[in-house]
């Protein structure tokens, strides 16, 4: 029994030592300074996977398979705009090295510029910024997957440049797997209408069977724009048409115009840079209250909204204030039911 206790104590001591070493290693890696060159390369994850397979096959001497797979990487070019990705990286906290002449250290000590005009950031700060960027791009609903790879620069460049030995110069590669540019849906369900006409506050609803068809367009312009058109018909033959279009506000204006640059480069004025969203919507709906108020309400709505984020529930889930300017024109026509008397 005494020998087993000694073995258990030794194992516990070894585990403590390993945990302490892992913690020190993590602290060292997270504080390790690297420099990120501008701009980041943006490629499709499909073409990247094909090139990786081709490199492996080339090492094995399988050149014929490489030639047969090469056309597939160019068959589906990336639709995403490169300027959008660069701005989203900067807004996520990535400090690119653009050869600035300023020197100094920020308040947190995470980014510095040395005598060779290099800007450094710790690995921990870069990792947090990359995680924020991936989450932000995924919430747009335009991508199946978003990955970011930190690649070291070529050895020839690092040898010719005189840099501190403790720092490394890297480049970001953004791998995007885009969703299809269209989506179609057809199905049925139940539509709930309030008996008081105030669907947001009423708790009494009447379910109705409905049939719904919806068509959507995704990222056609490359600026994570989305468009949705739906048609709904219920059991009483009342129809509903709806249109919704979301896109970044800066993409409406011509590139390099004054408004284009103002929105992207002035966060204090337009709140959020490239995330400032423009939403256009339209609704043609008929709400049936014949069984409760002996009337039907025909609604025609057209509206536009400028907001600091696209989706308040998703983009501000970690905190923040939803700011928006909204303008809506609504035409409501109440038709009383015709009684036989």
Image (cartoon, rainbow, N blue to C red):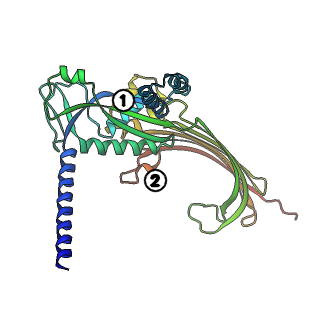
Q: Which of label 1 and label 2 is nearer to you?
A: 2
Locate residue 92: give its quadrant. Answer: top left
Q: Position of residue 67 (x, y in %)?
A: 52, 21
Q: Is residue 281 left or right of residue 31?
A: right
Question: CA separation, marks 1 and 2?
Answer: 27 Å
In this view, the residue in front, 300 or 315, is 315
Residue 9 in the image: x percent, y percent? 17, 71
Query: Residue at (40%, 46%) from the top-left corner?
Result: 135
Which is more N-terminal, label 2 or label 1?
A: 1
The answer to whether residue 194 shows anywhere in this view is yes
Q: What's the residue at 42%, 39% (across, down)?
A: 276
Quadrant where the N terminus lies? bottom left
Q: Position of residue 85 (x, y in %)?
A: 40, 33
Of residue 3 and residue 94, the one placed in the foreground of this image is: 3
Residue 263 can be seen, yes or no: no
Which numbered tag is attached to residue 313? Answer: 2
Residue at numbered disc 1: 262
The mark found on residue 6 in the picture is: none
Crowding at label 2, few (<14), some or many (≥20) Cα neighbours within 10 Å? few
Q: Are marks 1 and 2 in contact (CB under 8 Å)?
A: no
């Amino acid at each position: 029994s005494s020998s087993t206790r000694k073995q258990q104590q030794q194992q516990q001591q070894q585990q403590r030592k390993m945990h302490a070493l892992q913690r020190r290693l993590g602290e060292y890696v997270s504080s390790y300074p690297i420099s990120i060159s501008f701009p980041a390369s943006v490629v499709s994850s499909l073409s990247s996977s094909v090139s990786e397979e081709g490199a492996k096959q080339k090492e094995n001497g399988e050149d014929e398979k490489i030639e047969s797979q090469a056309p597939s990487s160019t068959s589906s070019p990336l639709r995403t705009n490169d300027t959008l990705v660069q701005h989203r990286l900067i807004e996520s906290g990535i400090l690119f090295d653009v050869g600035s002449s300023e020197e100094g250290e920020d308040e947190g000590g995470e980014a510095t510029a040395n005598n060779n005009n290099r800007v450094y950031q710790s690995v921990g700060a870069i990792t947090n910024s990359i995680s924020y960027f991936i989450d932000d791009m995924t919430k747009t609903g335009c991508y199946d997957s978003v990955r970011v790879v930190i690649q070291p620069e070529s050895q020839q460049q690092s040898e010719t440049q005189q840099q501190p030995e403790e720092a490394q110069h890297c480049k970001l590669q953004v791998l995007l797997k885009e969703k299809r540019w269209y989506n179609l849906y057809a199905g049925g369900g139940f539509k709930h209408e309030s008996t008081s006409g105030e669907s947001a506050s009423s708790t009494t609803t009447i379910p109705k069977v409905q049939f719904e068809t919806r068509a959507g367009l995704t990222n056609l312009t490359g600026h994570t724009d989305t468009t949705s058109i739906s048609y709904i018909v219920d059991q009483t033959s009342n129809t509903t048409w709806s249109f919704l279009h979301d896109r970044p506000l800066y993409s409406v204006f011509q590139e390099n115009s004054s408004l284009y640059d103002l929105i992207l480069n002035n966060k204090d004025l337009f709140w959020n840079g490239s995330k400032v969203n423009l939403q256009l919507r339209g609704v043609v709906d008929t709400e049936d209250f014949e069984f409760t108020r002996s009337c039907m309400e025909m609604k025609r709505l057209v509206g536009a909204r400028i907001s600091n984020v696209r989706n308040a529930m998703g983009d501000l889930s970690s905190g923040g204030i939803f700011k928006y300017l909204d303008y809506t024109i609504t035409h409501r026509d109440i038709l009383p039911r015709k009684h036989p008397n």
